[in-house]
Amino acid sequence: MMTQTADARLTWSRELLEEIGPVWHHLTLPLHVPARVAALLHRETLRFVDSRIDVDRNLIAHGQVIVWTDRHVAAIHLSKVGLDDPTDSRSPAEKYEYADVTVTVLPRSALRKVVIEGPGPSVREVSINSGSVWHGTPGGGGWSWPPLGQLSLYYKGLDGRLLVPANGRASAGFDALVDELMSDLPS
């Protein structure tokens, strides 16, 4: 029999998995990935989810998922995570034995710096944060976050930076997240 807490964690895990969505065609991350975050944050409301997940030819996922709630940010780094393929008849112990998932949860108030960094050397035709990315004019009555525009977020207690949007393309709600992030910065 499930307890209310266990049920809440499962519901939260499924909601997060839905926010991440399929990472390769119809295949998703396995439930054990969001369950780790739900174990810590299931009492909070999801505010925004961002991810960059690469999948190799063996259907093994590597990447990062970032989750914001009202009070916390969770950085999930994953590697060697087999995708949840319903046609795979192996047991969970066999399928997920080598998965490497680390979840770091920090208060949103740990945000120390938000930077729009220059693109640096790039061989791509259009670089992240290049002048051409930020030069565009609003079309049709409004301006939104530019494609290939990224923020670098620096949190106390987290080595390195978090890049958002991780894949270089802002999803619905990203403009609101930027406003919230600016409010998270200390005065």
Image (cartoon, rainbow, N blue to C red):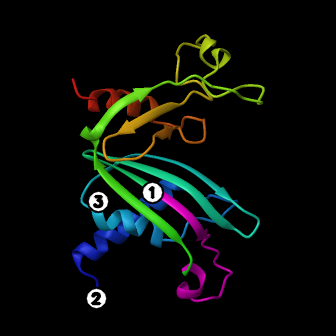
Q: Residues within 10 Å of mark 2 (few under 14, many from 20)?
A: few
Q: Which mark is residue 62?
A: none
Relative image position of residue 37 (x, y in whole percent)? 37, 62
Q: Label 2: state its secondary structure.
A: loop
> Mark 3 or mark 2: which comes first in sequence?
2
Give the CA distance from mark 3 to mark 2: 22 Å
Residue to which mark 1 is pinned? 76
Query: Residue, x 64% and y 25% (percent of image)?
Result: 120
The disc labelled 2 sits on which kind of residue? Met
Q: Are marks 3 and 2 in contact (CB under 8 Å)?
A: no
43 sits to left or right of 125:
left
User: Which image quadrant for residue 134?
Assistant: top right
Q: Residues within 10 Å of mark 3 (few under 14, many from 20)?
A: many
Give the CA distance from mark 1 to mark 3: 13 Å
156 sits to left or right of 125:
left
Q: Are marks 1 and 3 in contact (CB under 8 Å)?
A: no
Query: Residue, x 31% and y 36% (percent of image)?
Result: 111
120 sits to left or right of 2:
right
User: Which image quadrant for residue 55?
Assistant: bottom right
The disc labelled 1 sits on which kind of residue? Ile
Of residue 3 and residue 74, the one placed in the foreground of this image is 74
Of residue 115 and residue 73, the one placed in the foreground of this image is 115
Relative image position of residue 69 (x, y in whole percent)? 31, 48
Q: Which mark is residue 41?
A: 3
Q: Label 3: state its secondary structure.
A: helix
> Does residue 82 show up magenta in the picture?
yes
> Mark 2 or mark 1: which comes first in sequence?
2
Task: Name the quarter where the N terminus is drawn.
Answer: bottom left
Instruction: Read off the magenta span.
Output: 77-96
> Does residue 5 show up magenta in the picture?
no
Residue to which mark 2 is pinned? 1
